[in-house]
Image (cartoon, rainbow, N blue to C red):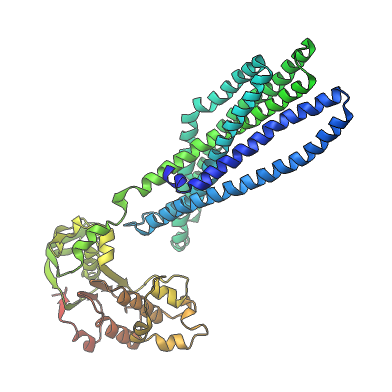
């Protein structure tokens, strides 16, 4: 987190500087109030009126500085969080695989917000609070050393309390964070499979499990908050004691005649400038510890190079010459799907894989894309066994499309370009989308979900063609379309420009079939 904070040194320094200035003004206010009391005791009407007017404008100035300080601090914190979020988004979009969307979304929303409010905001306040304590202590020592020593003895007890309980606080904060992530993942998974849950009348069972997880999280939150409340209440006891001790000892020295009434008021006021920051520092310290746990987890995750695509490794696959299956067999759930399959797919050729349902057509494509790794034999891209190629690199060199391509809730243009600056004019003409787009009210800026199934297939084909992948794999793309539309799209597929094209089809028009260089029949 240090590197993100130091990226905005000017904002950090200004936040601290204005926090210090605000603190100095408030500490000095104690002396002003002391002088006001002394002028009252001395029956100096002129001085009293002057000081009263001065106090009114002084408070106005202090509030202005406080407001300005808050704005500067807000800018610094939000800019720091923007950099952290930017890096985390960069990490998300470079992930090899996404095991749990809910976990990532929870971290981006909940954990980021906690880091902002609990960690950064309180960290800045702690710096200002420590400076306030130092300045208040300086003025207190000048007024009375003994009172200062007694007050500091109480302050040390308050400051040690959260440090002693630090490990317990971190432990429960981690458990609460994990609990939130677990529930988010659970709900997302359940909602995705809600139709299955309803069809099998399993709603009550799933509901019970979700309630159990919610109850467990509630118990953890109660324990975590109870610990924080316990620490705060003990701290507040000593904080209240500080104010009382300042007043009692101040009164004692007034009675002895060694302290003026004004100085006693200054001591009480300065005691408050000690109490308030100490109280907030104790509260902030527990939150900063909890926030730091989240920061460390997030930064550690982003620094895990094993989870992201190694772009340097992709340079080894700028040119694809062949894909080789060498005596490959695959068994899934004790059922032999692929048995001793050997074949070499060569650059510049188009391949059509046919066969009855269950023959392993789609499985061959999934093996190339590393969806299965428990096969025997070897599969090579050029001379590299795909077990040695990470998933991210595979997705960068292989374009894959099935009969249910994902369509974002965006315009047709954005679904084709995916926010990249790519000229799509020629490709929408090639796939036969131009006429459809011309008849839409908003044209290419209309929502893509208004299109039919076949039209959405064409949008997905636009993506594939524009992306210029070395290897293009198409799995039963036209299986759910009527014959005429399927024939149109199959005709587009066979002409996709790439090094190696492999298409899987259950039924395909004979005219289209003849356009492929090789036909692999898995039924033979």
**Can you name the residue that lies furthest to the top here?**
256
The correct choice, above or below, for 144 with respect to 49 in the image is: above
Residue 417 location, x and y as percent?
39, 74
**Residue 234 occupies quadrant:** top right
**Total numbered circles:** 0
The correct choice, above or below, for 305 with respect to 501 in the image is: above
Q: Looking at this view, is 388 or 250 the one in front?
A: 250
Q: Looking at this view, is 107 or 370 the one in front?
A: 107
**Residue 463 occupies quadrant:** bottom left
User: Which residue is located at x 37 percent, y 79 percent?
Assistant: 423
Name the quarter where the C terminus is drawn: bottom left
Q: Looking at this view, is 312 or 108 the one in front?
A: 312
Residue 173 location, x and y as percent?
49, 38
Instruction: Please indicate whether residue 364 sits to the left or right of residue 204 in the image.
Output: left
**Residue 32 occupies quadrant:** top right
Residue 99 location, x and y as percent?
36, 54
Instruction: Please indicate whether residue 453 sits to the left or right of residue 60 in the image.
Output: left
Residue 24 location, x and y as percent?
64, 34
Q: Is residue 283 visible?
A: yes
User: Which residue is located at x 31 percent, y 87 percent?
Assistant: 488
Instruction: Please indicate whether residue 377 sits to the left or right of residue 255 in the image.
Output: left
């Amino acid at each position: 987190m240090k590197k993100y904070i130091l990226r905005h040194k000017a904002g950090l320094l200004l936040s601290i500087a204005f926090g210090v200035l605000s603190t100095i003004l408030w500490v000095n206010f104690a002396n002003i109030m002391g002088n006001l009391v002394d002028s009252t005791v001395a029956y100096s009407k002129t001085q009293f009126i002057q000081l009263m007017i001065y106090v009114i404008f002084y408070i106005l100035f202090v509030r202005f500085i406080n407001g300005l300080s808050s704005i500067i601090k807000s800018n610094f914190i939000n800019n720091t969080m923007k950099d952290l979020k930017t890096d985390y988004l960069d990490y998300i979009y470079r992930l090899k695989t996404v095991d749990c969307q809910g976990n990532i979304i929870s971290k981006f929303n909940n954990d980021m917000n906690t880091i902002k409010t609990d960690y950064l905001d309180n960290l800045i306040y702690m710096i200002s609070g420590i400076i306030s304590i130092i300045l208040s202590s300086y003025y207190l020592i000048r007024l009375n050393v003994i009172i200062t020593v007694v007050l500091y003895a109480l302050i040390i007890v308050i400051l040690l309390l959260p440090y002693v309980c630090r490990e317990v606080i971190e432990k429960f904060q981690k458990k609460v964070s994990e609990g939130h992530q677990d529930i988010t993942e659970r709900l997302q998974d359940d909602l995705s499979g809600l139709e299955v849950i309803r069809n099998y009348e399993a709603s009550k069972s799933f509901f019970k499990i979700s309630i159990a997880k919610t109850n467990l999280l509630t118990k953890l939150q109660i324990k975590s908050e109870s610990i924080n409340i316990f620490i705060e209440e003990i701290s507040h006891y000593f904080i209240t004691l500080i104010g009382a001790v300042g007043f009692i000892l101040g009164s004692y020295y007034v009675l002895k005649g060694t302290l003026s009434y004004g100085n006693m008021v200054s001591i009480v006021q300065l005691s408050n400038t000690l109490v308030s920051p100490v109280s907030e520092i104790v509260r902030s310290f527990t939150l900063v510890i909890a926030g730091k746990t989240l920061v460390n987890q997030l930064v550690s995750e982003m620094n895990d190079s094993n989870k992201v695509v190694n772009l340097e490794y992709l340079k080894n696959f700028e040119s694809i010459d062949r894909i080789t299956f060498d005596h490959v067999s695959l068994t899934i759930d004790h059922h032999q799907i692929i048995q001793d399959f050997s074949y070499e797919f060569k650059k510049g050729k188009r391949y059509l894989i046919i066969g009855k349902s269950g023959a392993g057509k789609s499985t061959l494509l999934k093996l190339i894309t590393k969806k299965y790794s428990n096969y025997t034999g070897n599969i090579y891209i050029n001379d590299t066994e795909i077990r040695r190629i990470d998933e991210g690199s595979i997705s960068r060199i292989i374009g894959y499309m099935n009969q249910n391509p994902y369509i974002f809730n965006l315009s047709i243009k954005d679904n084709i370009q995916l926010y990249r600056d790519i000229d799509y004019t020629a490709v929408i003409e090639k796939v036969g989308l131009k006429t459809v787009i011309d008849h839409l009210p908003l044209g290419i800026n209309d929502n893509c979900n208004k299109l039919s199934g076949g039209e959405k297939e064409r949008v997905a084909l636009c993506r594939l063609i524009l992306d210029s992948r070395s290897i293009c794999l198409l799995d039963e793309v036209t299986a759910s379309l009527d014959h005429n539309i399927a024939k149109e799209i199959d005709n587009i597929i066979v002409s996709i420009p790439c090094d190696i094209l492999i298409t899987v089809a259950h039924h395909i028009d004979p005219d289209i079939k003849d356009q492929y260089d090789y036909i692999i029949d898995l039924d033979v």
